[in-house]
Image (cartoon, helix red, strand yellow):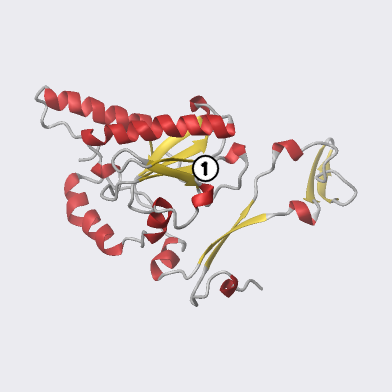
């Protein structure tokens, strides 16, 4: 039995997320423990050359990644419970009258974000950092990443604390966004050997927490939340702001910007 007190003295409900770890490609060879006398194969059915089996590798290869949220608040319990999904065209009025008041009152505690920015937690996990208060950020592995390059998943968390989401982005934030894009790509290339063409770099809307952050994922990895209705490529966000800025400078005042 897992005793949460072993790493957290607080009592309360906990959320435990279990995920099967991805296969490590370098281990998938005939000499590995995936194919040994220690493993077993149980036939479900066979039809000519096609067979369906249940394969049981050794216990060492049956790792399950566990993410623990403890103590979990009522908001966490709701978030990870079954939720129906709906499409809504969010107008500026809906955002200002409904969404903004709601997220202001119901936002998750962001202390864990500030702990990262202030090096109080996860300092040893930092991939790259720019300490500039206006254009800087801290990049760390996402909790969902298992460490395999093919499933690379990093978060770039901005230092500025007054940008909730892409709804707040304007022309003044272009240096910030471009800095994250450039330095994030350079760091990943140096540390993990992936270049820009192998990365999916995007922002979520709506995000899971309202402190601006950018997702960097290996293109081969179909991470949660990459579908068109939620993920917005960072390059497109930058381009939209630049186009909007040019149009506004020419008098197209009714054009709707990225943030508004």
Q: Quadrant of the C terminus?
A: top left
x, y percentage for residue 109? 36, 62
Q: Quadrant of the N terminus?
A: bottom right
Identify the element where label 1 is drawn. strand
Q: Which residue is mark 1?
A: 153
Of all residues, the one furthest to the right in this rendering is 37
x, y percentage for residue 183? 43, 32
Q: Answer few, some or many: residues within 10 Å of disc 1's Cα (few below 14, many 20 plus, some between 14 and 19).
A: many
x, y percentage for residue 128? 47, 39
x, y percentage for residue 168? 24, 44
The answer to whether residue 146 is above or below residue 49 is below
In the image, what residue occupies the spot 28% across and 32% down? 174
Q: Is residue 58 left or right of residue 37?
A: left
Q: Tell me the quarter of the picture where residue 150 sits.
A: top right
Q: Nearer the viewer, residue 24 or 155?
A: 155
Q: Nearer the viewer, residue 103 or 212?
A: 212
């Amino acid at each position: 039995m897992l005793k949460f007190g072993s790493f957290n003295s607080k009592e309360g409900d906990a959320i435990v997320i279990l995920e099967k770890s991805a296969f490590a490609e370098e281990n998938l060879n005939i000499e590995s423990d995936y194919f040994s006398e220690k493993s077993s194969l149980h036939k479900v059915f066979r039809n000519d050359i096609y067979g369906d089996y249940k394969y049981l590798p050794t216990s060492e290869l049956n790792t399950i990644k566990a993410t623990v949220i403890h103590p979990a608040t009522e908001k966490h319990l709701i978030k990870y419970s079954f939720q129906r999904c709906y499409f809504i065209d969010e107008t500026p009025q809906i955002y200002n009258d409904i969404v903004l008041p709601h997220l202001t009152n119901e936002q998750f505690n962001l202390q864990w974000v500030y702990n990262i920015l202030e090096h109080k937690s996860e300092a040893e996990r930092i991939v790259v950092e720019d300490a500039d208060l206006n254009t800087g950020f801290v990049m760390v592995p996402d909790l969902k990443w298992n460490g395999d390059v093919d499933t690379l998943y990093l978060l770039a968390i901005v230092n500025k604390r007054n940008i909730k989401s892409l709804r707040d982005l304007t022309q003044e934030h272009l240096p910030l966004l471009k800095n994250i894009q450039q330095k994030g790509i350079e760091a990943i290339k140096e540390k993990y050997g992936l270049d820009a063409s192998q990365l999916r770099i995007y922002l979520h809307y709506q995000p899971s927490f309202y402190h601006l952050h950018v997702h960097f994922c290996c293109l081969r990895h179909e991470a949660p939340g990459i579908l068109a209705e939620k993920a917005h490529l960072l390059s497109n966000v930058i381009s939209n702001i630049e186009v909007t800025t040019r149009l506004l400078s020419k008098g197209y005042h009714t054009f709707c910007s990225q943030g508004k």
